[in-house]
């Protein structure tokens, strides 16, 4: 492959792969409470280990 | 004033399901067939410059605008463009402009399902090695034409005449069945199954193709195929054709201007993010297109036909590349690696999943309209419009050779998309005001969109769209309308084809009139006041 083709391919792939990686990183690390039907509690339940008895 | 909300309280089951369904809607046949051919035929690297500029100035802004329009419509339980437009622009005309958002997706869905049925048929033909023995491009083109019912008089016939009708019927049935199961029960489930399979098949195929050795007598390698796509011919950047081709591809690949993204987004609440979801959808589609789509068909064609042969194939069109060249490639691979038919199943299987995840989305706006405005059950609407799609689809199958499909592909699948996008930008950004549009897109957002995009959405995207609409109108729409050229080629419409073209256009006009009438009836029935707008419905669709 010529240098120009490699450069254009690297830039194209790099751009879309960076964009998709960043998007999914943000999606997967999002802490938003999942409540699809809207009838759940206002905040996520606490993990059992932190519950005070 | 009331807002009809009969039974339309569907919701997405999970955020990943939503993203996969949205990405499935965007990822279609064009990612694997149209993109590599376009890139190779339009100056390689130069095309990629125009392509990424169009993505940033047109594709991603339109993606956010459509999610914004859809989610805003969902506040009033409007999953269709007539309602979405009326929710934004309190003017009696607003709802009627939305008719394009009904005719375009329904029209595209009908002929797209027919093309999708070819992929199902060829997946089965690959599994059974039905086309094995057709080892030349010409031989496979003859096989494809036979399947389509376009074999020339005296030419070889490989299929019974009912074959394309049977595959179309099965494909349409599957589409309508999925749609009738609803958002989370049908569309989301299909996306969760179909998209991972699509990715898996595409990665395997790209891996196999990119590691192919140079073929004896040809001497070309897959790397030369990539070079063919990416080598920059910077001298072509001053040709308007490249910029229009790239803008057109961005349009088709992201499924903007279709009405289906908006319908999907209407099942979200204002607490849900659309900024990051929209970006994730666009970037997923771009990854499939640029990284995977560019690494299969053209590198394979170059390896087995050489650069000159591949160039000739690319000029022959996307369907010849996918349905004739690739089966020849699989038969060649089979000589050294006896999995040729499995690769064929994977190739046509991935095209089928790419197609069906898009086509099920296209009927969603129409289903939403009749459910929300007339209280008709989803299943009844889906099967009724399935029956209509079947009747019109049979005409597409029967009159393929007379330009019936090409006519629809141009008016609803090309011109119609740009028209929808122009209306959306004018109504959502200009009439609703840029401030409100920007605020609306950022409700519940997980990211802050860079402010420059507000300027792009307000000025650059509309200008870009108007240039495309004007250019296509001058170069294509008017000559096609005046029958100076046909929609499928630069040649004028023949006398033999003229009646079929007239019927094709007549049905589209009837569809427009029918939907305008239905919109008027819906507004009367539900007592909507155009000047007051709709009553906001408290959402139970929160937290994705």
Image (cartoon, rainbow, N blue to C red):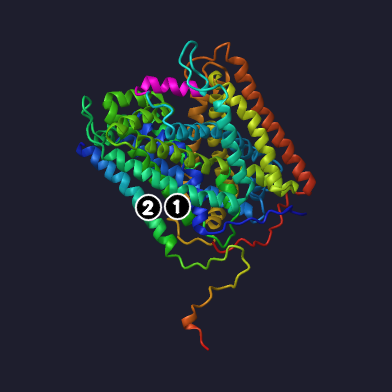
Residue B94 seen in this snapshot: no
Q: Where in the figure is residue B306, as x and y percent of width and height? A: 26, 26
Circle number at residue B279: 1
Say if the magenta span includes residue B140: yes
Residue at 47 percent across and 83 percent down: it is A50
Left or right: B230 in relation to B544 = left
Rendering quarter of residue B234: top left
Q: What secondary structure do most residues of the magenta stretch adopt? A: helix
Start-end of magenta stretch: B134-147
Determine whether B214 is above or below A35 in the image: above
Along the line of sight, the residue nearer the viewer: B227 or B192: B192
Along the line of sight, the residue nearer the viewer: A45 or B73: A45
Is disc 1 placed on a helix, strand or loop? Answer: helix
Determine whether B167 is above or below B461 in the image: above
Determine whether B483 is above or below B365 in the image: above
Residue at 28 percent across and 28 percent down: it is B304
Residue at 58 percent across and 72 percent down: it is A42
Contact flag, marks 2 and 1 (Cβ < 8 Å): yes
The C terminus of chain B is located in which quarter? bottom right
Residue at 54 percent across and 55 percent down: it is B435
Rendering quarter of residue B162: top right
Along the line of sight, the residue nearer the viewer: B317 or B148: B148
10 Å neighbourhood of mark 1: few (<14), some, or many (≥20)?
Answer: many
Along the line of sight, the residue nearer the viewer: B211 or B443: B211
Q: Where in the figure is residue B37, as x and y percent of width and height? A: 37, 31
Identify the residue at the far bottom of this view: A53
Circle number at residue A19: 2
């Amino acid at each position: 492959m010529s240098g120009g083709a490699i450069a254009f391919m690297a830039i194209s792939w790099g751009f879309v792969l960076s964009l998709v990686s960043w998007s999914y990183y943000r999606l997967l690390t999002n802490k938003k409470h999942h409540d699809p039907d809207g009838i759940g509690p206002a905040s996520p339940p606490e993990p059992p280990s932190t519950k005070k008895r | 004033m009331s807002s009809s909300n009969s039974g339309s309280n569907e919701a997405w089951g999970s955020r990943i399901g939503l993203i996969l369904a949205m990405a499935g809607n965007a990822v279609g046949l064009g990612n694997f067939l149209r993109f590599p051919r376009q890139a190779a035929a339009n100056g390689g690297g130069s095309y990629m410059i125009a392509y990424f500029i169009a993505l940033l100035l047109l594709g991603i802004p339109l993606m956010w605008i459509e999610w914004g329009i859809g989610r805003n419509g969902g506040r009033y339980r409007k999953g269709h463009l007539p309602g979405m437009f009326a929710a934004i622009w309190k003017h009696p005309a607003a709802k009627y402009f939305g008719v394009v958002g009904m005719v375009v997706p329904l029209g595209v869905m009908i002929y797209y399902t027919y093309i999708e049925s070819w992929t199902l048929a060829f997946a089965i033909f690959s599994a059974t090695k039905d086309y094995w023995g057709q080892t030349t491009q010409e031989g496979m083109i003859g096989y494809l034409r036979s399947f389509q019912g376009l074999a020339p008089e005296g030419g070889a016939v490989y299929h019974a005449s009912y074959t394309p009708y049977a595959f179309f019927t099965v494909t349409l049935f599957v589409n309508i069945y999925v749609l009738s199961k609803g958002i989370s029960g049908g569309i989301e489930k299909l996306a969760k199954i179909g998209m991972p399979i699509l990715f898996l098949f595409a990665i395997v195929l790209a891996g196999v193709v990119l590691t192919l050795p140079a073929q004896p007598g040809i001497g070309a390698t897959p790397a030369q195929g990539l070079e063919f796509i990416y080598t920059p011919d910077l001298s072509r950047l001053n040709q308007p054709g490249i910029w229009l081709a790239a803008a057109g591809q961005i349009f088709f690949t992201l499924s903007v201007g279709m009405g289906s993204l908006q319908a999907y987004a209407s099942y979200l609440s204002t607490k849900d993010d659309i900024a990051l979801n929209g970006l994730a959808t666009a970037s997923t589609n771009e990854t499939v297109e640029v990284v995977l789509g560019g690494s299969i068909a053209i590198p394979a064609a170059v390896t087995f036909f050489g650069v000159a042969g591949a160039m000739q194939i690319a000029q022959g069109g996307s369907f010849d590349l996918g349905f004739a060249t690739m089966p020849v490639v699989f038969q060649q691979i089979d000589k050294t690696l006896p999995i040729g038919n499995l690769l064929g199943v994977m190739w046509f299987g991935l095209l089928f999943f790419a197609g069906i995840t898009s086509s099920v989305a296209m009927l969603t706006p129409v289903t939403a309209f009749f459910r929300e405005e007339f209280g008709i059950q989803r299943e009844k609407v889906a099967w009724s419009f399935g029956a209509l799609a079947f009747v019109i689809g049979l005409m597409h199958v029967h009159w393929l050779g007379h330009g019936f499909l090409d006519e629809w592909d141009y008016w609803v699948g090309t011109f119609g998309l740009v028209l929808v996008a122009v209306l959306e930008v004018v109504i959502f950004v200009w009439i609703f005001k840029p401030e409100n549009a920007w605020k609306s897109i950022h409700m519940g957002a997980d990211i802050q969109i860079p402010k420059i995009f507000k300027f792009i959405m307000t000025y650059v995207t509309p200008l870009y769209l108007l240039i495309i609409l004007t250019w296509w109108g001058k170069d294509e729409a008017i000559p096609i309308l005046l029958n100076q050229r046909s929609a499928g080629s630069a040649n004028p419409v023949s006398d033999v084809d003229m009646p079929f073209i007239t019927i094709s256009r007549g049905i589209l006009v009837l569809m427009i009139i029918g939907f305008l009438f239905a919109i008027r009836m819906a507004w009367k029935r539900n007592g909507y006041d155009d000047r007051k707008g709709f009553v906001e419905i408290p959402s139970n669709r929160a937290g994705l």
